[in-house]
Image (cartoon, rainbow, N blue to C red):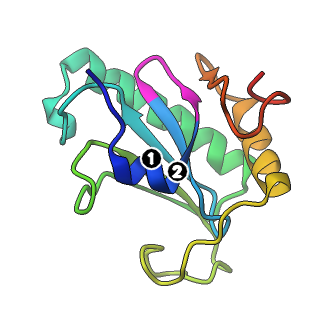
Amino acid sequence: MFELHPRLQQDTLVIGDFPLSRLLLMNDAGYPWFILVPRRAEICEIFELEYDDQVQLLKESSQLAKVLSRKFEADKLNIAALGNMVPQLHIHHIVRYRSDPSWPKPVWGLFPAKPYSPRALQKTCVNLVEHLHDFIPDPDCPVAPRVCG
């Protein structure tokens, strides 16, 4: 049975689901930072997924990356599955700009997270969700009903 790791529950907002993965938004307005979590129990590494799930994860990650790059006009996308703090397989998709406060360093731990305001959250999610295919917004999404309803 799939359950989201408590740290991911604490630090993110659920946006919705792709066929395989749950899409989360890191609650840090400093960066457009999304996370894909395959809805499979006790998986820590990509190679532990069944082959078809590996392919589906790559499709979902690529689609998300393409939309993020276009909609947020990224200078660079940081895409990574680290798992040092959260062992559950999850793939970070972070939009980076040469002008962001952490550039060119990683975003982890340099500055405290700044939670999204309702308006910024709406803008961030609308820019994204409208352009994703095979995506079902969560009915309890924090930007409901305009995007998720």
Q: Is residue 28 above or below residue 34?
A: below
- Report x, y in % for residue 147: 79, 30
Say which residue appears at 31% left-offset and 51% top-offset.
81
Work out how far the residue at label 1 is from the one at label 2, CA to CA, in angstroms.
Answer: 6 Å
According to the picture, the residue beneath numbered tag 1 turns out to be: 9
The quadrant in which the C terminus is found is: top right
Q: Quadrant of residue 143?
A: top right
Q: Is residue 141 above or below residue 139?
A: below
Q: Are marks 1 and 2 in contact (CB under 8 Å)?
A: yes
Mark 1, Cα crowd under 10 Å, few <14 / some 14-19 / many 20+, is: few
Q: Secondary structure under badge 1?
A: helix
Q: Looking at numbered disc 2 in the image, what kind of residue is underneath it?
A: Thr
Instruction: Kindly identify which numbered label has been placed on residue 132.
Output: none
Residue 50 lies in the magenta stretch: no
Mark 2, Cα crowd under 10 Å, few <14 / some 14-19 / many 20+, is: some
According to the picture, the residue beneath numbered tag 2 turns out to be: 12
Q: Secondary structure under badge 2?
A: strand
Say which residue appears at 42% left-offset and 28% top-offset.
21
Q: Looking at numbered disc 1 in the image, what kind of residue is underneath it?
A: Gln
- Report x, y in % for residue 39: 35, 26
- Report x, y in % for residue 115: 66, 64
Left or right, residue 44 beside residue 70: left
The quadrant in which the N terminus is found is: top left
Q: Quadrant of residue 53?
A: top left
Q: Find the magenta span and give its range.
A: 15-21
Left or right, residue 138 beside residue 77: right
